[in-house]
Amino acid sequence: MSKLVIKDLYVNVDDISIINGLNLEINDGEVHALIGPNGHGKSTLLFTIMGHPRYNVVKGSIYFNGQDVLKMTVDERSKAGMFLAMQNPLEINGVSTIDFLKSALNARRDTPISLYKFVKEFESCSKDVGFNLDMSTRNLNEGFSGGEKKRNEILQMKLLNPLLSLIDEIDSGLDVDGLEMVAKVINSMMDGSFSCLIISHYSKLYKLIKPTHVHIIINGKIVTSGDYSLIEKVDNEGYKWLEKEFNVSINKQENKRVSIGTCNVKESVNNG
Ligand SMILES: Nc1ncnc2c1ncn2[C@@H]1O[C@H](COP(=O)(O)OP(=O)(O)OP(=O)(O)O)[C@@H](O)[C@H]1O
Ligand SMILES: [Mg+2]
C-alpha cells in the first residue's frame, strides 16, 4: 500500500489558488525531492499535508496509509507518523525547548515517558544533531541562530521518529557540518518503513541524501518527475527550459494578489 497518496489537489490561501491539480505518491523507503522556483507552492504543499488552517483545500484528496488526511486534525496527523521540519521554525515565548520536546513525545505515547528515559534519549539525540544542551532550557527557537533552529528541527524529528518526514529547506542556515549531520540522520532513518519529501534549492543536500524520485513544481503543479539526473539538469540549466518543454510560464503575474498601492491609485482615479 502506498504511504502518501495525493490526488488532484487544489489549495487556496486567502482565496488565491496556490496548488493547482497536484498529484503525488510516496511509498515506504522512498526519498522524494521537490524542487521548483521561489513562490511556486512547495511550502504550501507541506503545510497543507500537515494541516495548517490557513491553507484551504478546495478540491482533491490526501491519504496516508489509507487514512483520509483531510479529515484528521494536526495532532492526529502527527500521531499517525507525519512530521514537518519547517522552512522558518516558529519562536515560542514562554515554552522551553526541552518541555516542548517532552510534550511532543508524550502526546504520541499512551503512557508518559519516564524523566530518566527522556533525558537519556534527549542527550543522545542532541549529541547526534550537534544541539548544544545548554539551549534546552531556553524558549523554543527564541534567539536561536538560523542553524540552531534547523538543528532543533532535526532533533525533534529524531526524537519523534516519524514514518514520513516533510523537510522544508533544512539546509538554509546550516553550516557544512550541519548539512552532513542532516544527511547522516536522514540516511540512518531509512530503515525501509521511513520515507521523506525533501525541499531544497541546492544540490549539495541531494548529493548526500540521494533521492529516489525528483519532482519539479511550477505554478502549484508537478510538471515533470524523474530521477536524480533531473536535479543535475536544473543545477546546470535552471528552470527556464521547462517553459518551452511543458508550456508553462514561470514568472506569470496573473492570479497574483493586487497590491494596496494599485487599489489606492484605482480608487483615487475612480473618485477623481
Ligand atoms: N499564508 C500565506 N498568505 C499569503 N500568501 C501566501 C501564504 N502562504 C503562501 N502564500 C503565497 O503562495 C505562494 C507560494 O508560496 P510558498 O511558500 O508555497 O512557495 P515556495 O515554493 O515554498 O517558495 P520558496 O522556494 O521561496 O520557499 C507565494 O506567492 C506566497 O506568497
Ligand atoms: Mg518555501
Image (spheres, grey):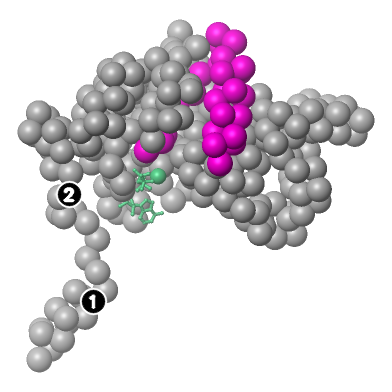
Residue located at (27% from left, 47% from top): 17
Magenta span has 183?
A: yes
Q: Is residue 266 left or right of residue 22?
A: left
Residue located at (59% from left, 10% from top): 191
Few, some or many C-alpha atoms within 10 Å of disc 1 (few <14, some 14-19, many ≥20)? few
Instruction: Name the image quarter holding the N terminus.
Output: top left
Q: Of discs 2 and 1, which sits in the foreground?
A: 2
Q: Secondary structure at mark 2?
A: loop
Instruction: Name the image quarter holding the C terminus.
Output: bottom left
Q: Is residue 150 left or right of residue 245?
A: right
Magenta stretch: give its range. Answer: 175-201
The reply to whether the residue tagged 2 has its Cβ within 8 angstroms of ligand 1 is no
Residue 251 — which label? 2
Residue underneath mark 1: 261
Residue located at (38% from left, 30% from top): 203
Residue 207: image location, x then y, percent:
43, 23
In the foreground, 133 or 190: 133
Residue 233: image location, x then y, percent:
24, 26
